[in-house]
Every structure is written in C-alpha cells, then in structure tokens.
Amino acid sequence: MYRFARRIARILWWASLWLMRRRWIRNLQRASIRWLPAKTAEKARLNLVRQNALGRRIGLRLITGMVMLFLISLAIQLVYSSAVYLVETGVLAPKKLEQ
C-alpha cells in the first residue's frame, strides 16, 4: 500500500509544483505582498520564502502521509461495510449467547 500511496503522492506533488510555477500564481503571491503596508511587506515576503522552503523540504513526505491515512481509512471503511453487508444478508451469522 505504501508504494501506491507514494505514487499518488508524487503525482499530487508534481501537480502542486507545476501550479506553483505558473506565472499567474507567482503574480498572485507578489500582489498579496504589495497589498500590505510597506513596513510589513518585507517581513511578509520573508515569511513567504520561508514557507516555500519548508514546503519543498517536507511537502512530499507530508502528502505521502496524508494519502496513507486516506487509504487506511478507505480500507477500514471497506472492511466494515463488507462485514455489515455479510451480516445483513445472512452469510455471517453472529452466535447467540446462551443465558
């Protein structure tokens, strides 16, 4: 399951990086800094650079972890739904407790 999650995470990571390299995204980032007052604009630009560096450093691992959690949750739901369906159709019959 890890390989599958890693593959999906790499595809999502590629799409995210592809979007972040588009001119209109970069223009939006620059515009958001220009809207700020002059004294906070420089600090905001440094924060943006720091956040981008952090994202590049741990982004793929973070996305892989989230995809793994999603797939585990999906597997648990599938097993639970299958068990409930089998009990309702009578294939699995719970034992009756004797009193």
Image (cartoon, rainbow, N blue to C red):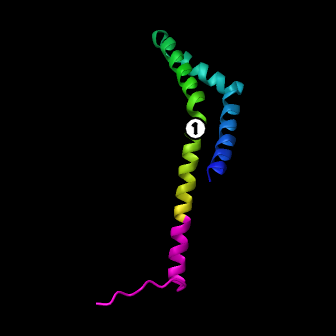
Q: Quadrant of the C terminus?
A: bottom left
Q: Is residue 49 left or right of residue 20?
A: left
Residue plotted at (57% across, 25% down): 52
Instruction: State which region is magenta.
Output: 78-99
- Give coordinates of residue 10: x percent, y percent: 67, 40
Q: Quadrant of the N terminus?
A: bottom right
Residue closest to the far left: 99
Residue closest to the far top: 39
Residue plotted at (55% across, 84% down): 91
- Give coordinates of residue 98: x percent, y percent: 32, 90
- The residue singled out by tag 1 in the image is 61
Of 15 and 1, nearer the camera is 1
Can residue 35 be found in the magenta stretch? no
Residue 12 quadrant = top right
Query: Where 73 falls versus 47 (above or below)?
Result: below
Can residue 82 be found in the magenta stretch? yes
- Give coordinates of residue 41: x percent, y percent: 50, 13
Query: Where 30 falls versus 67 (above or below)?
Result: above
Residue 23 quadrant = top right
Of 41 and 54, nearer the camera is 54
For label 1, count other residues whose C-alpha is less than 10 Å away and answer few (under 14), some (14-19) or many (20+). Answer: some
Under circle 1, the secondary element is helix
Count of marks overlaid on the render: 1
Type of amino acid under label 1: Arg
Q: Is residue 3 left or right of residue 66?
A: right
Residue plotted at (69% across, 37% down): 15
Query: Where 25 falls versus 44 (above or below)?
Result: below
